[in-house]
Image: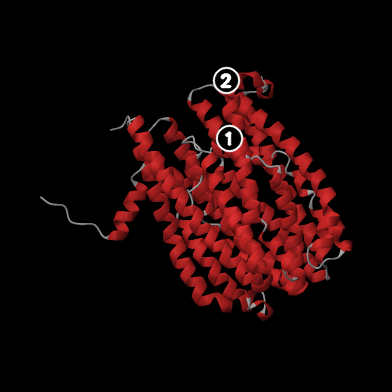
Amino acid sequence: MRAEPQPPARALARRFLDNPLVRRVIRNSGYLVSGSTIAALLSMGQSALSARMLGVAGFGLLGIVTQFATVVNGLTSFRMGQLVVNYVSEFSARNQQQHAAAVFKAAGLAEIVSSLIAYGLLLLCAPLAARYLAPNDPANAGLYVLYGLIILANLMAESSTGLLQVFNQFRLLAGITIGQSALTLAMIAVFFITGGGLTEVLVAYLAGKVAWALATTLAALVHAHRRWGEGWWRAPLSLLAERRRDLVRFAVNTNLTTSLNLVTRDSEILWLSAFSTPVQVGYYKLALAIRTLLINPVDPLISTTYREVTREVAHRRWANVRYLLRSGSLLSAAWTVPASLGVIVLGPWLIASVWGEAFLPAYNILLILLVGVVVVNILYWNRNVLLPLGKPEFPTKVHLAAAIAKTLGILAIVPRGGAVAMAALLSAFYAATTGILVWKTGLELRRAELAAPDPLE
């Protein structure tokens, strides 16, 4: 007897719930989504109070100072979280626990050194940033140095986050994220009531970031002790000698990709401040903040999907890899599409009600950003899957070409087009790079399937 066709909603639900891999992704993502959603709401409160306290221009300067520290830190970052997830998972799957501990130890040491270098670089560059970035006031150098202390707090934060993901501690990570956002909001609220200014807001943001970094690092060290024993940190780095080349290649390519992202994506506010005004930066910062509300619920899928994909690639279960990617995209689309439509309809009301009518020009900028958000959200896995497939250099090459094109675009149109032009370039960058990387991922999966058939088939 022929089975009755199921309604689309029920069929979609069964697709997610019937597969243990997808269930794990959903469960782990659920912890992070809950945490990031609550944190996003708290961040919106932080943003609203800061915007009303500082005004459009002051809000723009806040964005310039905070992003400067992020960019400088990223220049020396080797994305140790991804390296830890990739290689600790691999050695754990082989039951080589000492090797896994050595990877975390090496990643932590490298991250400490890179963080110290980054803070030294920030101290050198802070006077130049104050002089050449809007509002071009050398007196602001102290603000850059103050907020730059987050770099020292993040000595091992990336490696620690990666280890907690490997150990399936997504609920703990979510709790830490919520705690950080709550602390920052509480401090900003106090300063809002007592009449604080930009320095006080920066202190609040700094306190939250420091609390998150210290809590994450401490939690990772505790779980390393539980998993590998009291003397895990004595694991000799010589255990990694045979894989040293792979580890260095992975780290260098992720660092290069990160550095390119700094030029093409993460330094938008700095580029805009160099060629425009704090007011334009204020509008753009607000549009990015609302964009973040759309990205935050999807962002946890990146780490949880990457963890599962890495394990499946290690076992050469290619059908599972494809299933994870398709299911993840469907799950992301279920949020991204209706949420984007909601922002289009309710955007002006949301901006005026939460941040104030002075920020309404940010709506047109937001509409342009939505194009790129929809693409990169639904295909959120576009770059990470190539890492366990042995192609960490390909995203670097793609982002290099895109970085050159986008930088030329910034120089050509941002001085006249301001925040609107910057938004258009960012959306074009998202669409182009995502499309190329998704194509390459499909090609590499087909090659892998031909070279090593799926053991489940």
Secondary element at image label 1: helix
Name the residue rendered at 74%, 61% in the picture: 64
Left or right of 151 on screen, residue 448: left
Residue denoted by label 2: 242
Percent from the top left, x then y, of residue 95?
50, 22
Residue denoted by label 1: 250
Q: How many marks?
A: 2
Q: Earlier in the sequence, mark 2 or mark 1?
A: 2
**Inter-mark Cα distance, 2 to 1:** 14 Å
Q: Is residue 376 above or below residue 248?
A: below
* Residue 351, quarter of picture: bottom right
Q: Nearer the viewer, residue 108 or 25?
A: 108
Residue that protrudes farthest toward the bottom in the picture: 357
In which quadrant will I find the C terminus? Answer: top left
The residue under label 1 is which amino acid type?
Phe
Q: Nearer the viewer, residue 251 or 432?
A: 432
Q: Is residue 68 above or below residue 247?
A: below
Name the residue rendered at 48%, 68% in the picture: 340
Secondary element at image label 2: helix
